[in-house]
Image: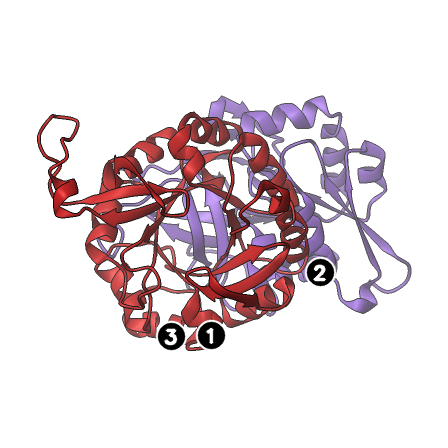
Amino acid sequence: MAGGRETVAVVDYGMGNLRSVAQAVLHAARVSDRVDVVVTASPQAVRDAHRVVLPGQGAMPDCMAELERSGLREAVLHAAATKPLFGVCVGMQMLLEHSEEGDTPGLGLIPGRVVRFRLDGQRQPDGSRYKVPQMGWNRVWHGFEHGAAERPAAHPLWAGIPDGSYFYFVHSFHAHPADPGHTVGVTDYGVRFASAIARDNLFATQFHPEKSAAQGLALYRNFLHWNP
Amino acid sequence: MLAKRIIPCLDVTGGRVVKGVNFVGLRDAGDPVEIAARYNEQGADELTFLDITATSDGRDLILPIIEAVASQVFIPLTVGGGVRTVEDVRRLLNAGADKVSFNSAAIANPQVVRDAAAKYGSQCIVVAIDAKRRSAEEERRPGPDGQPLGPGWDVYSHGGRRNVGLDAVAWARRVAELGAGEILLTSMDRDGTQAGFDLELTRAVSDAVDVPVIASGGVGTLDHLVDGIRVGGADAVLAASIFHYGTYTIAQAKRRLAEAGIPVRL
């Protein structure tokens, strides 16, 4: 990030309070980074930004409808084609082709779909029932040994973050990328699911880095220094 | 699997974090951001802020505190105390809270839990239940089926001053049906005693609902935290005094849980 100031746009399409996301990104920047973080509903501001964070809270049908209605859909697609973009929670789910939640089409930027946890009748290792939504701290595995058989080396955004670190989750649906190569982090909750996905200049997490203490900030810091 | 959580609770009044025993001898405990940052540093999984302000005039003073903490400390924040309306929920979420906790208002108007959960999602709506074991006389009170209630726990409102005549386990079930995403369960018999959680109460509520239960009230030792999870079946344990007075750090508590084979975020 040598040179001039960089702007990070947090896309505000009316779904939830985005301040914690913006503050965490700002907090993650080093003093020397010269980063401006803007929470914006302006398509032009998203187009002008160097990096984009796409958050998402609530139900996928509402998020997709609001993204459309706000006029930000094209700006997000433009960002996804041209610069580093970080999707969070439903902002991750929207990158896929389709979600079971309300039978909703996504942006189709990463092949695959979003499915609901089906954990009825299953018991956790300590004998308790699985609860949906999954709400709390769970481990994310991004190294070779824990993932699918054929996976690339750990994604650069994991630099300095130990394999199996805990991150904060709140969700009832999870991503199921069609190409295992797009899965860059997995988590176990009754089922092993993709908790981080990536393709080219896109990176997205089901968990909330902005609520995941030091490791979450480290992930945002790596995003600010990422030049895919 | 999910880690079990350790949650320090901070009392707030007049815009400051205070500490005291049973509301007596309140004194300033320092800057909220510093305290929150210290607990975060020690590995707290969440922070709960309880607004103990007696008047609605002072109520809004918690908003700047939540804003300040949320801008510096990046773990989930829960706020409770005097929350009455869906509008209260909105303002607290906008200030940076991740979850908002109802107590007396849910008893007076259960619909507010349903409305708040419908609007903002169950994941951010907590219902706090203050429960106290029934006396012999209270056990003879007729239940919904006309028979004596028998042993159990009653729900209290208004900071534990008013027995509202509800069975705690039945009430927990009801608020979960209404959309509460989590239950913060305090034993009034144990609160402030440092004698350990009421494990029977914790187990009865944990078994009755599908949402996470946070055990509260009575923690004096680290083994009490282990028991709350192991014996009580709690998903999270909340404590105030053992952390505020520096008896134990969060990190020590986490290590004890880990030694007992409980999954924790270290």
Tell me what residue is drawn at x 26 percent, y 35 percent.
B165
Quadrant that contains the C terminus of chain A: bottom right
Quadrant that contains the N terminus of chain A: bottom right
Q: Looking at the rendering, which quadrant does residue A153 occupy?
A: bottom right
Q: Give chain A's shade.
A: purple
Residue position for label 1:
B245
Residue count near mark 1 (Cα–Cα under 10 Å), binned few <14, some 14–19, many ≥20: few
Q: Looking at the rendering, which quadrant does residue A226 occupy?
A: bottom right
Q: Which disc, if any, is residue B255? A: 3
- Residue B187 left/right relative to B133: right
Q: Give chain B's shade.
A: red
Asked if both marks, 1 and 2, belong to the same chain, the answer given is: no
Q: Position of residue A162 (x, y in %)?
A: 52, 69
Tell me what residue is drawn at x 14 percent, y 35 percent.
B141
Residue count near mark 3 (Cα–Cα under 10 Å), binned few <14, some 14–19, many ≥20: some
Labels 3 & 2 near each other (Cβ < 8 A): no
Q: Amino acid at mark 1?
A: Tyr
Q: Position of residue B156 (x, y in %)?
A: 33, 43
